[in-house]
Image (cartoon, rainbow, N blue to C red):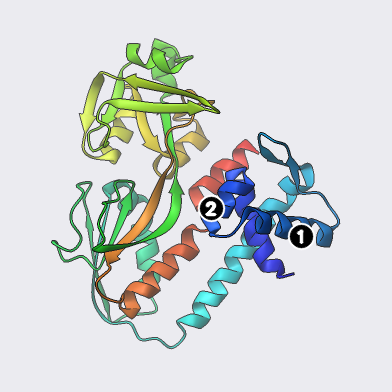
Amino acid sequence: MDQLKAMEIFVEVARLRSFSAAARKLGITRAMVSKQVLQLEDKLGARLLHRSTREVSLTDAGQAYLEPCTAAVLQAQEAARVITHAGAELAGPLRIQAPSSFGSEWLADSLARFCLPHPQLQPLLHVDDALLDPIEHGFDLTIRVGGIPDSRALAIRPLAPCHGVLCASPAYLAKHGAPQAPEDLQRHRCLHFSHLTDGTTWHLSRGEEEATVRVKPAFSANNGLVLHQAALRGLGIVYSTTFLAWRELLDGTLVQVLPNWELPLNHLSALYPASRKPSPKVRALIDFLLGEYQPVPPWDRQLALQRG
């Protein structure tokens, strides 16, 4: 048994709460996922997961093992990446485009640390929530949350899941009350991200149950950071993402609304022209970001620790 591979698979199953979803994410069969997890449990002498026909959940042993297992997987991936790029001299311009919120909250720091060993590299980070055409605007790499174009001209590498979250300030909820069902959102002040592809229609699900709500925005903006600040001020309920709201959800300055309901899962993806092989600096940056955000992105790890 390749124990590191089995650990990577276990982390993905624990994150997605599903053998089938983990298999699709990893590009292997469900049977292989199940076999690897069973072999890992045999190796450890402990049952890590509860299996049922409806869901997969962590045992007490699995919960205790998940955090150090995730850390070990990330460390091994980092070590492999260091060896892969050891001695590589990356230089010249590197044009990157990213959404404003993600670019400011996470990518700027990751990019700075990526560039430290490569002083000849000249990054240009363009943050913009508009869905700009990477080829037309000459970007070497575009980071996008959802909104993936149906284009054979672009190659796509998924970097991390992007979980949506509805949240509001305690002051807003104290004044207006918390919605108890999705249809209650129609009576609330909603803060709307104007780049949502479905406009003012919000989709939610709970198991097999689905709900579609047409909201009347009390405030709209084309920038997630603007809406985030408005929510903190108590203006209304914001459709946000865990990568942007995680810190405030942890410290209680924002509270998740309708926590038993889920928003559609998007992905954080890297896009680059498919017509040419990515340059060493683009490949190196993608590998670095995969190490940063896989198998579970740091913002979701922090939230999972609190909920666990």
Identify the residue at the far left of this view.
Answer: 136
Q: Residue at x 63, y 50 (%)?
A: 13
* Image height of 12 relative to 110, above or below: above
Residue 88 placement (x, y as % from top left):
40, 86
Element under label 1? helix
Q: Which mark is residue 40?
A: 1
Quadrant of image for the C terminus: top right
Horizontal placement of 19 versus 96: left or right? right
Residue 137 placement (x, y as % from top left):
14, 62
Q: Residue at x 61, y 57 (%)?
A: 29
Identify the residue at the far right of this view.
Answer: 45
Of callouts 1 and 2, which one flags the residue occurring earlier in the amino acid sequence? 2
* Image height of 90 relative to 293, above or below: below
The amino acid pointed to by label 1 is Leu
Residue 144 placement (x, y as % from top left):
31, 52
Element under label 2? helix
Badges 1 and 2: C-beta atoms under 8 Å apart?
no
Q: Which residue is mark 2?
A: 24
